[in-house]
Image (cartoon, grey):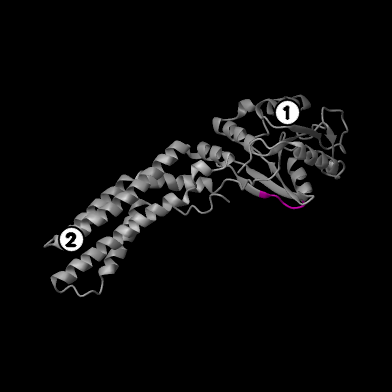
Amino acid sequence: MIFEKINTVPTSDELVDKAFRRGTRAMAGKDLRGREALLKANESMMLTAANILSDNLGNIVRRFPSFEHLPPFYYDMVDIIADVDDLRQALSRIGWASSKIHEISRQYVQKIRKSESPQQVRKQAFGRMASIMASIEDDLLYLNVVRNKLRTLPDVRDEPTIVVAGYPNVGKSSFVSSITGATPEIASYPFTTKGVSIGHFIRDDVRYQVIDTPGLLDRPMADRNEAEMQAIAALKHLDAIVFFILDPSEYCGYEMKDQLQLMNEVKEKFPLPMLVGANKIDLNNVESEATVQMSTMTGEGVDEALDELVKMLNQEVIKEPLA
């Protein structure tokens, strides 16, 4: 997963406490008799604390992915969650703080060496470092919130993809389970309350990805908030087709006219090829606009639907790959 390397972002106070404790330990047990020993001890204490702060801040910046090289799908996801420009600015301020603390440590090494009161100079250096850390406190808190959200994003891979759509209870989850042969992995978008199901299957040595997106492609567009609409738009970056499932029996609780209206909205708003399938033909084999007929309960027609989906994917020219 692309965001797994982002560790918990510590607070300003946590980093300062860690750095100053390590700095104090660097001076512990040393013989402080004589001017030279005192100078070296205070220099070591100051440099140790500065390196802890500078290195930790630098690591925070490095562990966030480069936005210039982020796949388009994930770039859009990050922009929805955090606003890429705000995230860039926060990371830039953290990077500045890392460099500034390193610069201060170099300046104060010289001051300590020339001072008649090295302990007092070292305290001044600590004061400046603490002031810089306080100035980026909000940035560190913000980055940790973003980090926690990014790590919940589903692991969408660079593979031919089937995005399953349709009203709730039409059989989307059953279809995903039946063609993947296992319980799909469940992940979540930070801006929806429902988990995204992701499964995989292999055909002719090619691995395919199947995504069921409850909360995104299962209700009228007018009912969605801005973040959900942006998430729908982000899916266009995938090498994907849409499998829209209808339930002509209406056992799902939604009339066919409403299901067809949603289908047309998805066609209009979601610029990917679509295959329409009718499920639950074992309950009521009603004529519909579906290209394929199936029953995820009995398995009838499921293989034929999958064959058609794979055929469509293999015919598609990849316009904008995930990576």
Labelled disc at residue 263:
1
Specify the quadrant of the image occupied by residue 222.
Answer: top right
Pointer 2 residue: 112
Which kind of residue does numbered mark 2 sit on? Ile
Q: Residue at x 40, y 42 (%)?
A: 90
Labelled disc at residue 50:
none
Q: Is residue 182 magenta?
A: yes
The answer, for residue 148, to whether it is visible in the render is: yes
Q: Earlier in the sequence, mark 2 or mark 1?
A: 2
Specify the quadrant of the image occupied by residue 319.
Answer: top right
Residue 147, percent across and down? 48, 48
The answer, for residue 246, to whether it is visible in the render is: no
Q: Residue at x 84, y 35 (%)?
A: 292
Residue 70, percent across and down? 54, 43
- In the rendered structure, which segment of residues is drawn in magenta? 181-185
| Secondary structure mostly seen in the magenta stretch | loop
Question: Mark 2–mark 1 contact, CB under 8 Å?
Answer: no
